[in-house]
Image: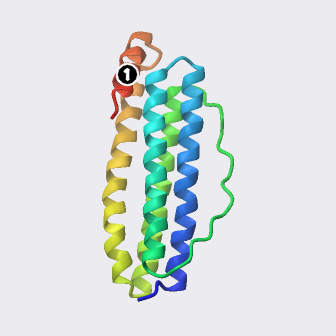
Amino acid sequence: MVIKDKVMKSINKQINAELYSGYLYRAMAAYFESTNLPGFARWMEKQAEEEHNHAMKFYKYVFERGGRVVLGAIDAPPSEWKSPLDAFKQAYAHELKVTALINDIMKTARSEDDTATESMLKWFIDEQVEEEANAKFIVDRLALVKDHIGGLMIMDHELGERK
């Protein structure tokens, strides 16, 4: 079965959102590198790679369903944040936005009676639960650390261990 136009358009929009996510996390990685927090930078680089992989899953899915991918311009992300906590608060807010976008695709798929897309989206919905939880956990830890340099260095080390 060929993917329906409304579903294809919503997935194309999501591909762009996932690519933007990767771009945003690379900008955050650059910020962390510039502030001598290589562990935070590594965490964000890994996150950027993950977002690229998400975009490619959607990309391949459209072709598997006989559709066409149309790539749009990727907006420039911010390049400065007030603090590591500010950056992670924005990352968490961004993950909430991505979740809402995926939920919108699910609504479109349901309205178009596209059970194949609903099935594919289950993986992304589960993934977003994990993405939100990870970002929120780091926000909460950074809120506890506040301006304590020792705590920040411990977190930098821990985040740098991300595989």
Q: Residues within 10 Å of mark 1 (few under 14, many from 20)?
A: some
- The image's colour scheme reads rainbow
Instruction: From the viewer's side, name the closer residue of 99 and 57.
Output: 57
Q: What type is the residue that disc 1 sits on?
A: Met
Q: As rendered, which of 56 and 115 lies closer to the eye?
A: 56
Image quadrant where one finds the C terminus: top left
Question: How many numbered circles does the render carry?
Answer: 1
The spot of residue 154 in percent (x, y) is: 36, 16
Q: Does residue 140 appear left or right of residue 74 in this picture?
A: left
* In the image, farthest residue toward the top: 150
Q: Secondary structure at mark 1?
A: helix
In front: 66, or 44? 66
At 33% from the left edge and 44% from the top edge, which residue is drawn?
Answer: 133
- Dividing the picture into quadrants, the one containing residue 158 is top left
- Above-or-below relation of 92 to 125: above
Tell me which corner region of the image, top left, top right, bottom left or bottom right, holds residue 144. Answer: top left
Give residue 86's position: percent from left, percent from top.
54, 32
Q: Residue at x 42, y 80 (%)?
A: 109
Looking at the image, residue 29 sits to the left or right of residue 122; the answer is right
Residue 12, image x, y percentages: 56, 69
Instruction: Please report the residue visible at 43 percent of the width from the left and 12 percent of the height from the top.
Output: 148
Q: Is residue 44 left or right of residue 127?
A: right
Residue occupied by mark 1: 155
Quadrant in which the N terminus is drawn: bottom left
* Residue at x-position 39% and y-position 25%: 160
Q: Quadrant of residue 127?
A: bottom left
